[in-house]
Image (cartoon, helix red, strand yellow):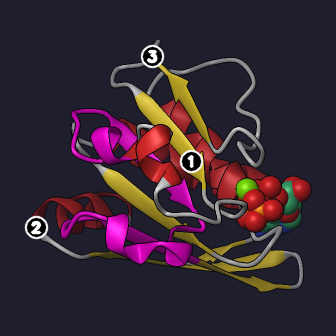
Amino acid sequence: MRIETPEAMEALGRALGEAAPAGTVIALHGDLGAGKSVLARGIARGLGIGGRIPSPTFILVAEYTEGRLPLHHCDLYRLSDPDELVNLGLDEVLGGDGVVVVEWAERFPEILPADHLEVRIAIDGEARDVAIAGTGPVSQRLGSAVG
Ligand SMILES: Nc1ncnc2c1ncn2[C@@H]1O[C@H](COP(=O)(O)OP(=O)(O)OP(=O)(O)O)[C@@H](O)[C@H]1O
Ligand SMILES: [Mg+2]
């Protein structure tokens, strides 16, 4: 789908956050500045999480517990050693009942569960082309709910 503005990107995220069942894992793919963190902020809003949702570029994982489900927002861009994923507790939250949003998941694709939602964002000037695909029954249902 074509997303013309940051506001539309956030609205797409909100729809995902509203529809996401417990255990949802969403992998966000796209170049620097594509809008992954904007989409993640929308997902937080859809789960009922207010306040600032900063990019977790340096802390790698941010957790928000005030919404309908816990949200774990991860950015693996700066992660060099996959063993660190255990220290960050990411292996645990990936099998948990919250919603996990992973920016730069392509750096460590092996950590993703078999059933997860793939969101690919391509930059086209000010607009973004967004492709959403589920890799299993749960994520496919979520993808259909917003697409
Ligand atoms: N159509 C659009 N959709 C989303 N963001 C847009 C759009 N047009 C412009 N932008 C801008 O692009 C930037 C996207 O930044 P964002 O931090 O979300 O990117 P990112 O993919 O998370 O990058 P990084 O890989 O550095 O984490 C924002 O400043 C946003 O306002
Ligand atoms: Mg980001």
**Residue 63 x %, y %:** 52, 27
Q: From the viewer's perspective, is 61 left or right of 94?
A: right
Specify start and end residues of the magenta stretch as a single range.
Answer: 91-120
Q: Which residue is mark 2?
A: 137
The residue at the far top in this view is: 66
> Mark 3 or mark 2, which is nearer to you?
3
* Amino acid type of the residue tagged 2 in the rendering: Pro
In percent of the image, x 52 and y 77: which residue is there?
Answer: 106
Task: Judge by depth and name the residue closer to the eye, 99 or 4.
Answer: 99
Which quarter holds ligand 1? Answer: bottom right
Per the model, the C-alpha gap separating discs 1 and 2 is 23 Å
> Mark 1 or mark 2, which is nearer to you?
1
- Looking at the image, residue 17 lies above or below residue 140: above
Q: From the viewer's perspective, is 49 left or right of 125?
A: left
Label 3: element kind: loop
Task: Judge by depth and name the residue closer to the eye, 54 or 94.
Answer: 94
Q: From the viewer's perspective, is 23 left or right of 18?
A: left
Circle 1 crowding by C-alpha within 10 Å: few under 14, some 14–19, many from 20: many
Q: From the viewer's perspective, is 137 left or right of 140?
A: left
